[in-house]
Amino acid sequence: MPLEIITIPCLADNYAFLLHEPDSGVTALVDAPEAAPIKAELDRRGWGLDFVLLTHHHWDHIDALDELRQIYKPSVVGAEADAHRLPPLDVAVKEGSVFSLSGEDVQVIEVSGHTVGHIAFYLPESKAVFTADSLMALGCGRLFEGSAAQMWQSLSKLAALPTDTMVYSGHEYTQSNAAFALTIEPDNSALQMRVANIKKARSAGVATVPSPLSLELATNPFLRANLDELKQAIGMEGIDSEQVFAEIRKRKDRF
């Protein structure tokens, strides 16, 4: 049975996620931006907190951990390669690691680029991937530490997941990402439709995260850098996909 997944808005534009297995009552949290909204959701549902899964070391993904740790005593899972910059880990994982969350496999994917040592958590049975600031709704994270080559490799791994996977990313940046995406592929009809839907959702205060991977593949310029139609749209026909991705990322940085 797929896990119950709850999206929790935190800070100005972050998201954290609760994963709950109803039969066992086991609950995990992906990233810990802000304690109050996470605690409020757990209290409202009468849940404890057994695990915290950390994607990367940036403050807006780990700051609430100490407080949550004091209250709930969860087991903390994070990247072995990033252990020196993360809060103390109970379980250190890396690319290819698999661990069990109340009987469901959680696969670890290394997705460096935004940071070096960033990881994503993929749950095949629940058809969910938690990507934080690697693959985002209509975007990808800024390259603070890694290279364009690293990020393109990371995004290519995520793009290869089953297309019915839901992508749970770390921020509500979708509207600004949409405005940029239109500068890359203004004639993409799927993108035009998505932009209209995003505008409606945000006007109603509805989160645009998660999003289906199939929709990202059809509309997210950072996942589409290998496609002839996108290369043609930006005048880079015949250019290596990694270079095309790097150009799109540079344009986004200036946008």
Image (cartoon, rainbow, N blue to C red):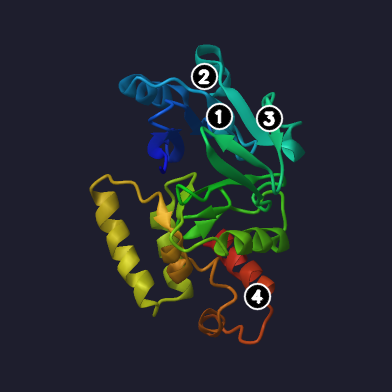
Residue displayed at 72% across by 32% down: 85
Q: Which residue is mark 3?
A: 91
- Does label 4 or label 2 sit earlier along the sequence? 2
x and y, in percent, of residue 254 in the image: 56, 62
Closest to the camera, between mark 1 and mark 2, is 1
Closer to the observer: label 4 or label 2? 2
Residue behind mark 2: 68
Left or right: where 116 falls relative to 26:
right
Task: Say which of 77 and 251 sits in front.
Answer: 77
Neighbour class for label 1 at 10 Å: few (<14), some, many (≥20)? Answer: many
Counting residues from the start of the chain, the first of labels 1 and 2 encountered is 1
Residue where numbered disc 4 is placed: 241
Query: Disc 1 marks which residue?
Result: 52
From the viewer's perspective, is 252 left or right of 218? right
Q: Residue at x 60, y 40 (%)?
A: 55
Mark 2–mark 3 distance (CA, rounded to whole Å): 17 Å
Q: CA distance from mark 3 to mark 1?
A: 10 Å
Mark 2 or mark 3, earlier in chain:
2
SS type, badge 2: helix
**Above or below, 100 relative to 156:** above
